[in-house]
Amino acid sequence: EVQLVESGGGLVKPGGSLRLSCAASGFTFSSYSMNWVRQAPGKGLEWVSSISTGRNYIYYADSVKGRFTISRDNAKNSLYLQMNSLRAEDTAVYYCARESSSPENFDYWGQGTLVTVSS
Amino acid sequence: NFMLTQPHSVSESPGKTVTISCTRSSGSIASNYVQWYQQRPGSSPTTVIYEDSQRPSGVPDRFSASIDSSSNSASLTISGLQTEDEADYYCQSYASNNHWIFGGGTKLTVL
């Protein structure tokens, strides 16, 4: 059974940092691109970042570029999101999502971890 | 990047049919696949349609979708509405700068 379990969320002050983790199981993690998607309270889904299987291709939404860093450890079946210079508008539930290329879609999502940026 | 615009909300009665639109602001809707996700309250999103019109196994055939180049939009149609279909629905597509774009979401209320 495919499982994605996020952790690392919490309350952080503006300007602070946080590192999210996503533990993957039930599939060959190294064979899939992975994504972070966030959802602010009561709002819609916003794609944050993606990373290819071999970390060759990394992309960020303009809203987080230069502040967030996505990474992965295929040996540990884990995805990470280092978030620096956090702002109130980064407050959201952060989901990790597996990206299937065939067929194309985000076919598995974690349960999400809540990040709250507030003083 | 283009935007995907969805109606904020739609409502319909059980047993009826509802259609949710997703309009691409620039570039052709046909240039990249469109996916549709369902998000029930308190849950993570799940795929109900991938690659414009394909249904994952386990998704009822009451769910169908298409794209229309003339209106540059995608549409998700749910027939025989059931109360369990009440959820938020999001369209998604891929942009040429390797970014994923989500629509703003549509809240479906089954009255």
Image: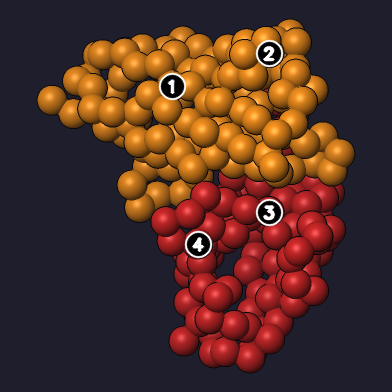
Chain colours: A orange, B red
SS for tag 2? loop
Report the Cα–Cα distance between label 3 and label 1: 24 Å
Give the residue type that dot 1 points to.
Answer: Leu
Give the residue type that dot 4 points to.
Answer: Arg
Q: Is residue B44 above or below residue B60?
A: above
Which residue position is annotated with label 3?
B47
Q: Is residue A28 above or below residue A108?
A: above
Report the Cα–Cα distance between label 3 and label 2: 25 Å
Estimate how packed mark 2 is, as few (under 14), some (14 to 19) or many (20 or more) residues with alpha carbons within 10 Å. some
Residue drawn at point x = 54 percent, y = 85 percent = B12
Which residue position is annotated with label 2?
A74
Q: Residue B23: tell me if it is visible.
A: no
User: Which label number is shown at residue A20?
Assistant: 1
Q: Position of residue B87 (x, y in %)?
A: 51, 66
Which residue position is annotated with label 4?
B40
- Residue extending farthest to the left is A119
Chain of the residue that carries numbered disc 4 in the rendered image: B
Residue B38 placement, left or right of A91? right
Report the Cα–Cα distance between label 3 and label 4: 12 Å
